Amino acid sequence: MDPANLFPLGWQHYLLGGLMIGAGVALLFVFTGLVGGMSSVFSSTWSYVLRAPYFQQARYTGTRNWRLVYAAGVIVGALVWWLGFSDGVALRTEVPVWALVLGGFLVGYGARLGNGCTSGHGICGLGSLQWPSLLAVLTFMATAFLTANLVAFWGLA
Amino acid sequence: MSGPTKMTPAMALVVLASGALFGFGLSLSTMVQPEVVLGFLRFRDWGLMLVMGGAVVVTLLAYKLAPRWLGRPLLGDYFHQHVSQWNRDTLLGSALFGVGWGLSGVCPGPALAGLGTGNTDLLWALFGMAAGALVQGLRAGRP
């Protein structure tokens, strides 16, 4: 197969971006020993304001500070790219609001129930050769492929 | 994975820098654009595999080599591990996560990074994720 068909927009920025994401996770690990999945911050941050027992677990109360700093870093890094390395026009998306809210809800609920997302299971889990993470990745890839194509087929979004 | 992590200023700086590299990489690789992610999920552009592959390889090397070469992290107490289990929750959670991801083209990292690119539309996704994590935690009850 012609690579140009696989990557109509080019491939270099994908690979370079991926290596940088890995470098971020690696930097965090080498210096602090922490595992840098992203979805936990959505639970751990609730522990600041909610007394519900689930949120008061040590795995959230004990990690909420660094997770919040890590999430802030993600925004800062994107800001640096936007201001310094793009054309400076704010990005927009054509995905309708209902799909962003409902999709976001399922992403938040599912990632926390399944203990990981594309970075937690996908990058950190696969990076530590955890076979349950591989099964998790295969599961969400399958349902994501199915959903994205059905939504397009039905012309929903 | 659990246990409080004392945060010295040096550590906070490293955590911030790590997140920044992550966020820059997400932006450079255009993963912050839901359209690109949906293009992958609709088999039009395989770029996401390169992003994932590149990130996994670097992570794998760090997770394998750092404990061997360093013994302990440069600033922390010990090397943590991502412990995942395969059970009903992981299966159901991952399946639901995929449905949401396929619907919106947004996952947690890009939802945050997207804000740094001025994409305020993604606040809707971020709001959804916070609500989803809230409902999950309340439904879970006592751990």
Image: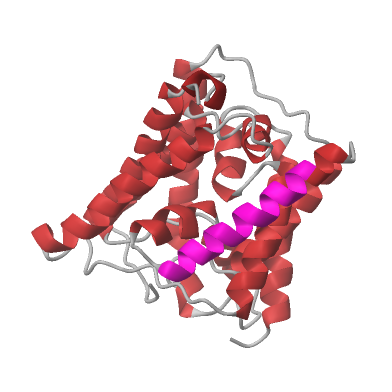
In this rendering, does residue A4 appear at all?
yes
Question: In the displayed structure, would residue B97 be above or below residue B48?
Answer: below
* Main SS of residues in magenta: helix
Q: Residue B106 occupies which quadrant of the picture?
A: top right
Residue A146: in magenta span: yes
Left or right? Give the position of A90 relative to A13. Answer: right
Left or right? Give the position of B92 relative to B86. Answer: right
- What residue do we see at 47% from left, 27% from top? B28
Q: Residue A156 occupies which quadrant of the picture?
A: top right
The image shows residue B126 at horizontal and vertical percentages of: 68, 48
The image shows residue B7 at horizontal and vertical percentages of: 32, 60
- What residue do we see at 49% from left, 21% from top? A2
- What residue do we see at 58% from left, 72% from top? B90
What is the quadrant of the N terminus of chain B in the image? Answer: bottom left
Write the start and end of the magenta stretch as one range: A131-149
In this rendering, does residue A46 appear at all?
no
Left or right? Give the position of A89 relative to B21. Answer: right
Residue A103: in magenta span: no
Q: Residue A110 occupies which quadrant of the picture?
A: bottom right
Question: In the displayed structure, would residue B113 be above or below residue A129?
Answer: above
Looking at the picture, tell me which residue is in the foreground, A66 or B78. Answer: B78
The image shows residue B42 at horizontal and vertical percentages of: 69, 37
Question: In the displayed structure, would residue A51 be above or below residue B113?
Answer: below
What is the quadrant of the C terminus of chain B in the image? Answer: bottom right
Q: Count how many numbered circles sit on residues in the image.
A: 0
Q: Residue furthest bottom?
A: B142
Question: In the displayed structure, would residue A156 be above or below residue B135?
Answer: above
The image shows residue A49 at horizontal and vertical percentages of: 63, 68
Looking at the picture, tell me which residue is in the foreground, B56 or A62. Answer: B56
Q: Residue furthest top?
A: A87
- What residue do we see at 52% from left, 76% from top? B86
